[in-house]
Image: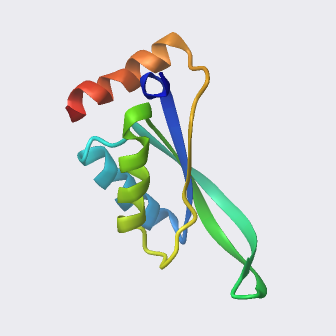
Amino acid sequence: MADDKAALAWCPFPDRESARTIANQLLDEKLIVCANILGEIESVFEWDGERGNGVESGVLFKTYGDLLDPLVLRLGELHPYEMPAIIGWQCDTAHPETMAWITQLRSKSS
């Protein structure tokens, strides 16, 4: 069953402050156990038919499998971008101790 696995979500933010604020909100709401806020990343993209680029902060969110869909939806509601790029996936493998840590989230969100 996919829901008994760890899951990850990736999303870029305009800056570290907005990433940190939303990560704390998602921790408070028990939708994640951790958010890894990465250093500056350069994004090169196409938007409205034009090529663009910008500097963003990428975030990798760790969660439990059955919380991935609610996490992605809530992240979309909280995100400062009009149309944020949010991608989530189920993990095939996690270290047993990592999985035990992530599993605690499921019991806290119930």
Horizontal side of residue 4 vs 47, given as left or right: left
Q: Residue at x 32, y 50 (%)?
A: 26
The residue lying furthest to the front in this view is 1
Place residue 108 in its image quadrant.
top left
Residue 52 position within the rendered picture, expressed as x and y whole percent measured from the top left: 75, 82
Please state which of residues 23 and 66 is positioned toward the viewer in this rendering: 66
- The relative height of residue 109 versus residue 49 in the rendered view (above or below) is above
Residue 32 position within the rendered picture, expressed as x and y whole percent measured from the top left: 37, 40
Q: Residue at x 42, y 47 (%)?
A: 69
- The relative height of residue 48 versus residue 104 in the rendered view (above or below) is below
The residue lying furthest to the top in this view is 96
- Looking at the rendered image, the quarter that the C terminus falls into is top left
Please state which of residues 38 and 83 is positioned toward the viewer in this rendering: 83
Residue 75 position within the rendered picture, expressed as x and y whole percent measured from the top left: 40, 59
- The relative height of residue 33 versus residue 12 in the rendered view (above or below) is above
Q: Residue at x 33, y 43 (%)?
A: 31
- The relative height of residue 5 versus residue 54 in the rendered view (above or below) is above
Place residue 12 in its image quadrant.
bottom right
Q: Residue at x 43, y 65 (%)?
A: 17
Horizontal side of residue 79 vs 105, given as left or right: right
Residue 72 position within the rendered picture, expressed as x and y whole percent measured from the top left: 44, 53
